[in-house]
Amino acid sequence: MPERTETESRKLLGRLRDTLAESSAGQARLDRITHLIADSMETEVCSIYLFRDAETLELCATEGLKPEAVHQTRMRLGEGLVGRVARTATALNTANAPAEKGFRFMPETGEEVFSSFLGVPIQRLGERLGVLVVQSRDARLYSDDEVYALEVVAMVLAEMTELGAFLGEGEALKALHKQAVMFRGQSGQEGAAEGHVYLHEPRVVVTRPVADDPEAELTRLHDAVEKLRLTVDDLLAKTQADGAGREVMEAYRMFAHSRSWIRRMEEDIGRGLTAESAVEKEQSSARARMDQVQDVYLRERLSDLDDLSNRLLRILTGQGHDTGAEMPEDPILVARNIGPGELLDYGRKLKAIVLEHGSVGSHAAVVARALAIPLVIQAERITTEALNGDHILVDGDQGLVHLRPEDQIASAFRDKIAMQAEAQSRYVSLRDKPAEATCGTRINLHMNAGLMADLPSLVGSGAEGVGLFRTELQFLIRNRVPKRSELAALYARVMDAAGGKRVVFRTLDIGSDKVMPYMKRPDEPNPAMGWRAVRVGLDKPGVMRMQMQALIRAAAGRPLTVMFPLIAQVGELTAARKLLLQEVERERRLGHVLPEKLEIGAMLETPSMAFAPDTFFDGCDFISVGGNDLKQFFFAADRENELVRRRYDTLDVSFLSLLKMIVKRCAAAGTPVSFCGEDAGRPIEAVALAAIGFRTLSMRPASIGPVKSLIRRVDLAELKARMDAAEAEGAESLRPAVLDYLRSLS
Ligand code: PEP
Ligand code: MG
């Protein structure tokens, strides 16, 4: 067997291209291709296996195995050597196949056992489509060059499969991107929506995988790389990142100049690929590696490479970010991941968002929640399946996504949306009514906010004020520290929009999950319990002081309410208050109008403060319980960790005892107390909180209707009695008692 040379693999690709150009049917094309490869590579067998579903491969064409086995022989992912290639998405080359781990003899394909085996994945940008195999009787190990040549052919096959060149009978030859697929992700923000896919980064379609003139392709590649380097340099010059941010950008730039990356693509072109398919081939193998790498740093570098490849593909194909795809009227954004700034650019016109990555605490999730857009995260592989304009249903409550759904699913889903809409209209009718329980107790319902865009909900939801304005969102969505004048203008607009209603501004709570791209971030073993919130503000007061100045200027004579997050010791509140008062004094000296009234409060988010000396309760103008943090520290269960975050119940007697103690101590000190964690927005938890004495609850605007509606049906004294009785009987969670009571109402 002679060594394959570049020219030979180019010849093979040339023959392949001619075959593809013939107007034969899908199956006939596949048959011709296996014949051609076996002939060119001088092997007895060449076979193409394609996926018929996510778990099963089917023999779709063969030269050398029994023809009857075609469309009959199937194997599961990971089964046999073919299944192994499919699962690992890497080539397998062996001179002694029967000795390989996982080898399985399949008599239905022929009597013989072939000694040598070379299998390469047929994949396109991480989408696994099948496996291409050559086998021969003699015990030969295919040369690196042959492996490479077969990979190049597989790449072209992948491209052509994507373009529908092999459509035919049977599941495996069905058109891609036509079947209904369901994705099981996780809920990032509740709500249901029906609409059409709008891809954040549309797929670039390579229509010309095989080149006519390698020299011309090399020139195209080099020109494109040159352009890419210029844009990356430009990007770097524009970013004012320092520290870690700068390092990341430098690493990105280094990749754009990587010799080995360019060399691999030049080699691909030498073997007959066009510049764009060479880029895509390298991108595909980087993505396959990305799926296997555990190391976070390495994964990020591979994702840089992915991003650079996308840019290069756009330069080469002219298919820009804007592929001309019109945004549908009911857009559902589908993306691998998205930054908070980009998400804000789309704004409220999105009906839902589906992300392949992302986490509950990611910035995109924070923004989606603030905009009340249903969000599903961790919907694996959705960007490889979804096409612009596909019909899609998103169930943010369950974390489910139906792509190209069957009619039955769609109609069941519409019923669900209709029921939600009906409930919503019922809530609108409650908007101007008080949240008054049947026993006559009134509960004040406030809303949580973080963006200017939230403010219109103040009127729409019937909230009595903003109980928590999370100021860090403004910092998270920018790529530099906002200026004092920008913040002052924004806070002033927030107060204007609130029209005299009270807005509780919480000073920056950065650190933990909320990390700013432009700020140095210490590498902390446990950031939620690390250097965050007021701890940063007190140790390095520059930004917090600037924020205080902005707040005082924004108030410009109006009342101002400021709250400090994560106070864990009385001394921290004393120090923060002192800083604020110093800033007030400074502003006075500078001649600015001072707030008419200044209220200073603390968030109670660590168990330590429930046991704090009386001076804490006496020294606060108000206290707001941050249930999200308080609960995670009380149960030692990370609120961002899917494995434990739902493990402990808010209505657990131990947690409720802590809350009751807080309510009691606040009452004794005459200090108003509210609850502003997520639980305040869950109707069942909300009535329980009201029953144990909370008179103010702050929640996301969409929760106000459902919470108010339930409060108005409940007798809080009666509910409290039921809860006390269950506790006396030794119940661990009071949820069953609360639910029993609520059922008795209907
Ligand atoms: C909380 O911890 O309950 C809270 C409201 O603050 P955040 O969710 O912003 O930490
Ligand atoms: Mg908190």
Image (tube, helix red, strand yellow):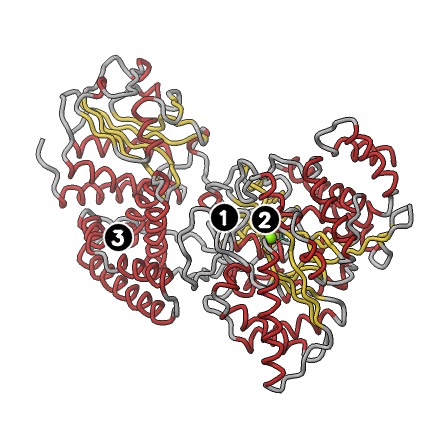
Q: Given contact means CB atoms under 8 Å apart, are the residues at marks 1 and 2 in contact?
A: yes
| Secondary structure found at label 3 | loop
Mark 3 or mark 1, earlier in chain:
3
Position of residue 413 in the picture relative to residue 387 (left or right)? right
Q: Quadrant of the C terminus?
A: top right
> Dot 2: few (<14), some (14–19), or many (≥20) neighbours within 10 Å?
many
Q: Quadrant of the N terminus?
A: top left
Q: Residue 445 lies in what quarter of the image?
A: bottom right
Give the image location of residue 449, x and y in percent.
66, 60
Mark 1 or mark 2, earlier in chain:
1
Residue 147 is labelled as: none
- Label 2: which residue? 375
Q: Amino acid at mark 2?
A: Leu
| Secondary structure found at label 2 | strand
Residue under the point 58% across and 53% down: 568
Give the image location of residue 675, x and y in percent.
71, 52
- Label 1: which residue? 358
Q: Nearer the viewer, mark 2 or mark 3?
A: 2
Residue 274 is labelled as: 3
Q: Amino acid at mark 1?
A: Gly
Residues 6 and 199: in front is: 199
| Secondary structure found at label 1 | loop
The vertical placement of 227 against 702, above or below, is below
The vertical placement of 513 against 228, above or below, is above
Residues 440 and 21: in front is: 440
Give the image location of residue 703, x and y in percent.
73, 51
